[in-house]
Image (tube, grey):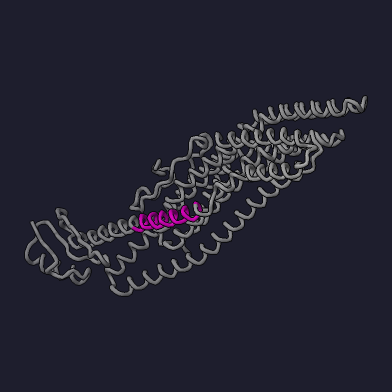
Amino acid sequence: MNQIYSSTFLPEISIIRCVNIVAPEVPESGKRLMPQVDNWIEGFQLILHDVIPLLIPDLQTAAQICVALISCVVLVSLMRSFSAKVNRIAVISAVVVIIGALMRTTNALIGLGTRTITDMTEYGKLLLPVLTAALAAQGGIGKSAALYSATMIFLILLSKLIQKVFMPGVYIYLASSISAAVSEEPLLKRMKEFIKNGTVWCLKTIMTIFVTYVSITGVISGTTDAAMLKTTKTVISSAVPIVGGILSDASEAVLVSAAMAKNAAGIYGLLAILAVFLTPFLKLLCNYLLVKITAFICTIFDCKNLNDLIEDFSGAMALLLAMTGCVCLMILIGTVCYLKGVE
Amino acid sequence: MTSIGQYIVSVSATAFFFGIVNSFVNHGPNRQLIKMVCGAYMLILVASPVFRITPVDIFDAYKDINIEAREYVSEGEIMAETEYRAIIKAEIKQRIADMFPHNNNIEIDVHLESENDFPEFVTIRGNFSEEEKNILTEKIYLDLGIPAEDQLWTE
């Protein structure tokens, strides 16, 4: 396991005896944005501050593509107004131009989304065992096992579904949209709608089940752990006065240090996930919004097929946003549940 | 991404092939049947990634994850137990050392019971008079519950 000592995040703990908790090193894709602070709010603000300059080149390219798309639709609209005969040829040519302009970007964004999901999943697989051991050291034996099982199984299920089903689904969605733009076949339209709605429904369902499961198991096992901890402490300190006191104090010290180390590792993990996630997510979001705005502007020129095609490309980007966001949200929710600890 | 590429190529190639087949049989007697067979095959091909994730895989993964969870939990417990015992030993050593305020040249070694972490026996190395030893043996017994026979005094 590739790990580093998170000593920067444990300045106070490092001078006293504490449970040796180490957070996994931030993946390569997130190193550029990873802040060297131990405070969640400050770290988040630093990530946001650093991520904006990284988006500007992509925004400029996306804006240029959008201007080209609008020009293309305007041109087709003008041609149609001069002669109805050129309608079909003009639309097909415009479809080719739109595919040429958007397919490269979309393909790059799909690649970026896939890499980000893989990076986050792999990081989650390193972070969750550390937090599980830390929470167990803090006394949350039942809760840590339940949280690990739930988060891991849902994370693996979601990432497998995304890689094997939803990502090919995005390509099929785009293929159906392109075909629907040049053909009047209603089946193609229904197919793309089915893929889009099906993907969104699956993601929503998985997230809902995950959140419900984690909440219920977290509350039930957390309460049991807390009750057990209190009983143990009381029995030890009341049974033997001096040695019992020493044992009780030692137990308290271990629990406190484990909680501090776990929180430090958890905050480092949260910031690492955000450092990996935010740049691709915001790139996707910017492209999505620009293409959406382009589709909105194109409605003025009354070219339904072309307008639908541009809208479908923005739909594909929305699907990518949803998939990346779901994986990130799942790891963040899981980590926050660990941070909540034993109450 | 290679598998995605292969998937797209296979779907596109099959669709292309069926398109050609359908154009030939467009007016034939078995038109409906051929269209149906082509459609069913295409549906299976398009949905093939879903079939690759079988429930058996998920259940196997869940079993493995549960085993992993238990391993990580026991790792945490061992970590906490090690630190817990280290803190107890350090605290007991400190308490015994505090009983010798004028003697800095002593070495104390504490052994804890494996079951309930109570001090089992103690080894004290240093120069002490018989009178000092007797007073301190009693004190260690009263304060820490370590009887005289479990206290080893060496020079």
> Extreme left residue here?
B130
Of residues B5 and A53, the one nearer the viewer is: B5
What are the residue bounds of the magenta stretch?
B57-77
Splitting the image into 4 quarters, where does residue B94 fall? Answer: bottom left
> Extreme bottom residue here?
A239
Q: Is residue B105 visible?
A: yes
Q: Position of residue B102 (x, y in %)?
A: 16, 58
In this rendering, the answer to whether A87 lies above or below B138 is: above
Q: Position of residue A341 (x, y in %)?
A: 47, 59
Q: Is residue B139 visible?
A: no
> Is A166 positioned to the left or the right of A223 in the image?
right
Asked if the stretch drawn in magenta spans residue B76, the answer is yes
> Is A249 positioned to the left or the right of A142 in the image?
left
> Extreme front residue here?
B29
Q: Position of residue A267 (x, y in %)?
A: 49, 48
Splitting the image into 4 quarters, where does residue A316 fall? Answer: top right
> Is B143 positioned to the left or the right of A132 in the image?
left
In this rendering, the answer to whether A340 lies above or below B10 is: below
Asked if the stretch drawn in magenta spans residue A148, the answer is no
Of residues A141 and A99, the one nearer the viewer is: A99
Splitting the image into 4 quarters, where does residue B24 fall? Answer: top right
How many labels were placed on the picture? 0
Q: Residue at x 93, y 25 (%)?
A: A82
The secondary structure that dominates the magenta segment is helix
Q: Residue at x 17, y 62 (%)?
A: B122
Q: Position of residue A277 (x, y in %)?
A: 57, 41
Of residues A205 and B63, the one nearer the viewer is: B63
Q: Residue at x 89, y 28 (%)?
A: A80
Q: Residue at x 60, y 54 (%)?
A: A206
Of residues A257 and A28, the one nearer the viewer is: A28
Q: Quadrant of the N terminus of chain A?
A: top left
